[in-house]
Image (spheres, helix red, strand yellow):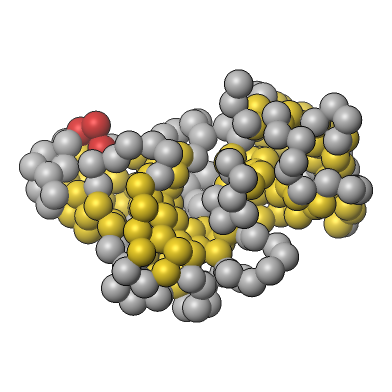
Amino acid sequence: EADIYQTPRYLVIGTGKKITLECSQTMGHDKMYWYQQDPGMELHLIHYSYGVNSTEKGDLSSESTVSRIRTEHFPLTLESARPSHTSQYLCASQTSGRGKNIQYFGAGTRLSVL
Amino acid sequence: QKEVEQDPGPLSVPEGAIVSLNCTYSNSAFQYFMWYRQYSRKGPELLMYTYSSGNKEDGRFTAQVDKSSKYISLFIRDSQPSDSATYLCAMPSGGSNYKLTFGKGTLLTVNP
């Protein structure tokens, strides 16, 4: 069972607020990812990190930012939330070992911006 | 052309039915394929992992790969209401082993 945790699970917030979605993993994985998923839609990669102090933007443009100061922690921040940011945000991690490149997911944060 | 195509369904079957879920892909260099299962309001979890060279069976689940057609399938035998979920295929993305491209997912409902 994967040990990757996301908080909060649900967040309802007003427009213009700054928010941080937390993601932590205890597996020592180097690689971590943030995906955005709207209901009934596919996962879109918005950010990824291959290690400490390494972050890259994903395939889907996002106004959010990320940081990777510690291996186990990969928070996502929205400086000024807008209704268009309403979505589910999923965090994942992956080992650097050879062979199976399996991504393990957290339970997600469902964000609603009013 | 998208790297991975998956019929989003939805698919509704009676309990005990055999379910077939499918994806097509465009990159013949893909070497492995994954199926994830996602329950409502949860994150995806890995269900099956298969290399391009063969099939794999795990209990009621069988993953098949047809390299010539660039087509992968997940079969569920004796489907149960607890199998009701969205099933996503996933493959390495754009030549990288560290990024995955997911299909849109097929929503499956198994009716008791």
Vertical arrangement, residue A91 with respect to residue A60, above or below: below
Measured as percent of width and height from the top left, residue B107 is found at: 62, 33
Vertical arrangement, residue A83 with respect to residue A106, above or below: above
Q: Is residue B110 left or right of residue B60?
A: left
Q: Is residue A4 left or right of residue A113?
A: right
Q: Quadrant of the C terminus of chain A?
A: top left
Residue at position x 89%, y 53% in the image: B57
Q: Quadrant of the N terminus of chain A?
A: bottom right
Residue at position x 80%, y 31% in the image: B71
Measured as percent of width and height from the top left, residue B33 is found at: 73, 47
Q: Where is residue B11, by image quadrant?
A: top right
Q: Is residue A88 left or right of residue A106?
A: left
Q: How many numbered marks does the figure carry?
A: 0
- Identify the residue at the far left of this view: A16
Measured as percent of width and height from the top left, residue A101 is found at: 65, 60
Residue A58 visible in the displayed image: yes
Residue at position x 74%, y 41% in the image: B29
